Amino acid sequence: MSSKPAILGYLPQDRPPLGAQIALGLQHVITMFPATVLVAILTNFDIGVTLFASGLATVVALLGSGMRIPLYYGSSFSYIAAVSAVMGAEWGGQAVAQGGIVATAVVSVAAGFLIRWVGKDALDKVLPPIVTGSVAIVIGISLAKTALDNASTQWLVAIVTLLATVLFSVYLRGRGFFSMIPVLLGALVGYAVAVMAGIVEFGAVGSAPWVQVPAFTLPKFRWAAVLAIAPIAIATIPESTAHLYQISLYVDRLAEDLGRKPQGIKNLIGLNLILDGIGDAINGLLGGCAGTNYGENNSLMAITRNYSGPVLVTAGIISMALAFVGKLAAVVNTLPTAVTGGLAIFLFGVIGLQGVALIQSERVNLFEPRQLAIGAVILVIGIGGSMFPGGMLPIPVPGLQTAFPDGLPAIATAAVVGILLNALFLVVPPRVAEDITLDEAPEPTEAVEAVEIA
């Protein structure tokens, strides 16, 4: 008689052995590294400062939540257009953009306290599962082009990385510690192939200093920058909330499998947004990029069933160390784009499917016209808009052209439009047949009665 395999996984407050904790933390860093560094490059922010601020924001958030919210804070693509516009303006620059990023913290913290005051049920009316789930789908699918662009730098390396990661995630499931590090193992396989292919450059490692001090800068405040950057925080709230709902769903499923009580992370939405805001404040004050909790790391946790808060704290500490240890940062930076592209194909797809899982788990009725309308509009605006250059919808909006010279950010616009559509249906609910009570039903006509008698 075969014994039932043991359930493997870590809940948010679980602490793995130290060696496993470091390896799992490194896996998180590899997962967040490409996007976080890319945002810093695209906005001309210091990479070392961005890594340090990202790690510090993660550590503060985990400690602030008592290890209850297992999310990694990283730089967000949603802010690139607005931050770049301020960076390029005559009155702007990095310090001025940082002032706008600090202002996003005020928006997120205020939203968090508002939600804690009005309660989760009120938020669920404004951000129902069809909105948060559809936004999650858009985030994952809209990143597909980025994943393939990275993979296209060396298709063989990317395909080997992808295949290895997929095989490890499927066939190592339930096989001890290795079942929790498929992405790290896939990255190592891809890295080895890249070395054999001769596309890994080690020159920067030799010339890098052992110790370096990141170029921290202080913010300057201008109303123009505040008005250009702060409103983006409103658009990232659905993204952050979607991530929280996703992770709550998977954590509670693991808790059930382990015979432990549900964690109820989805009830911590207000605290999550407050901690998001604190993360933005840390970045704005030090010189890092504005961000939110990372879907890529959510995908990693869903794949590995490792939701340990201490592991995420370890990842944050490693990220902070990368900013000061020049050799270590240089080694991590040798990871070829093709390897990260192979990983991204898998991880970004999982983000999208987590949105589908969220909609399914909440039993959203997709035969109901309101739900269809909201979801359909979010998907087309978000995914279709992401196909335009820079992921910007080419829609000129009077008064916002300084902040958005190339149009509106597609994902943020899709989220806002979905919220507004849902609000419209709440304020002016459609009158459908099911809403008509028996008392309001019309009396049968004589013709109908005659037919019935006949």
Image (spheres, rainbow, N blue to C red):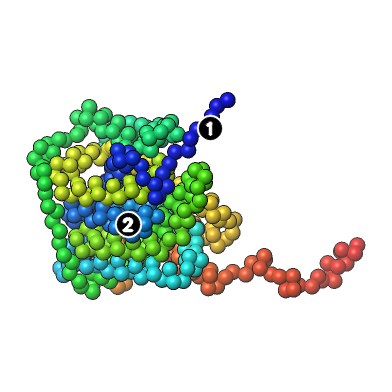
- N-term-proximal mark, 2 vs 1: 1
Q: What residue type is labelled 2?
A: Leu
In x, y percent, where is residue 53?
A: 23, 56
In the picture, measured across the screen, residue 69 lies left or right of residue 256, that is left
Element at label 2 = helix
Closer to us: 139 or 239: 239
Q: Mark 2 points at which residue?
A: 63
86 is higher (above) or lower (below) than 35: below
Q: Residues within 10 Å of mark 2 (few under 14, many from 20)?
A: some
User: Residue flagged by tag 1: what amino acid is it?
Assistant: Lys
Q: Is residue 126 left or right of residue 21?
A: right
Q: Name the residue under label 1.
A: 4
What residue is drawn where x is 21% and y is 64%? 285
**Residue 94, label in figure:** none
Q: Which residue lies furthest to the right in this view?
A: 454
Q: Residue at x 30, y 41 (%)?
A: 18
Residue in view at x 21 percent, y 41 percent: 332
Query: Where, quadrant-wise, is the C terminus in this rendering?
Result: bottom right
Residue 278 percent coordinates (x, y): 29, 63
Quadrant location, the N terminus: top right
Question: Separation of disc 2 and disc 1 at Cα?
Answer: 36 Å
Q: 230 or 224: which is nearer to us?
A: 230
Q: What crowding class fits label 1: few (fewer than 14 Cα within 10 Å), some (14-19), or many (20 or more)?
A: few
SS assignment at label 1: loop
Can I make out residue 396 in this image?
A: no
The mark total stands at 2
For residue 391, which quarter of the picture? bottom left
Q: Do the residues labelled 2 and 1 touch (CB within 8 Å)?
A: no
